[in-house]
Amino acid sequence: MVERGGATMLHVDIMDGHFVPNLTMGPPVVESIRKVTTSVLDVHLMVTDPDTYAPVFIKAGADQVSVHYEAARHLDRTLRLIQGLGAKAGVVINPGTPVSVLEDVLYLADFVLVMSVNPGFGGQKFIPNSLNKIRQLARIRAEKGLGFAIEIDGGVGRDNLESIVEAGCDWMVAGSSVFHSADPAATVKELQQLAERASGTIRV
Ligand code: ZN
């Protein structure tokens, strides 16, 4: 449905029941999704042990894997591990974690994912301070001539999409606003049009 609407990236939330209270899906589900799509599979690991699980999900078909700053004990090594297996490597920060802690990995990361809700559940409200983090990241990227993409995840929908794009975000993850709408394909199309008007590119 969402591909019919124009989505070219599918974001998959993996929760382990430890790093976050919820449990979602494991590698077999990602393998199954891989078989039916050529879209970019963007796997977001909300797990306490990303070094163990990143390779497993890349093997299952992930094109890119993001790991939480708060969970990675050796973040530089974990990002290199992911890239060494042929996937793009992203780092994620929770709402309570400042952008400044990423200073020494930004040159290495392929993308940075800003959590705009506390991870663990769908359907939460967007935390407005996330826009400041996007602006900060976009500024650092320009100042240092870096190439990482900026992604946002949590509470994204038609009400805040334009301000997110204007802040400098490249990839917007929309979950509830798409899948709980009456017509997910039409909603993706509408969100993409909104984003394009705000001069960005949206992938759901
Ligand atoms: Zn996510």
Image (tube, helix red, strand yellow):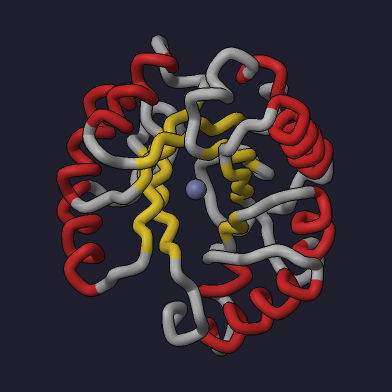
x%, y% of residue 59?
16, 44
In-front residue for pair 23/164: 164
Q: Quadrant of residue 80?
A: top left
Question: In this image, 55 relative to 14: left or right?
Answer: left
Q: Residue at x 75, y 49 (%)?
A: 168
Q: Residue at x 23, y 47 (%)?
A: 26
Q: Residue at x 62, y 40 (%)?
A: 115
**Taking the image as drawn, is residue 133 in sight?**
no
Determine whether 112 is above or below 8 in the image.
above
Question: In this image, 100 relative to 41: left or right?
Answer: right
In-front residue for pair 197/119: 197
Determine whether 84 is above or below 7 in the image.
above
Q: Quadrant of residue 186?
A: bottom right
Q: Residue at x 62, y 70 (%)?
A: 177
**Taking the image as drawn, is residue 151 in sight?**
yes
Q: Quadrant of residue 86?
A: top left
x%, y% of residue 69?
52, 22
In-front residue for pair 177/51: 51
Determine whether 141 is above or below 173 in the image.
above
In-front residue for pair 78/156: 78
x%, y% of residue 15?
38, 41
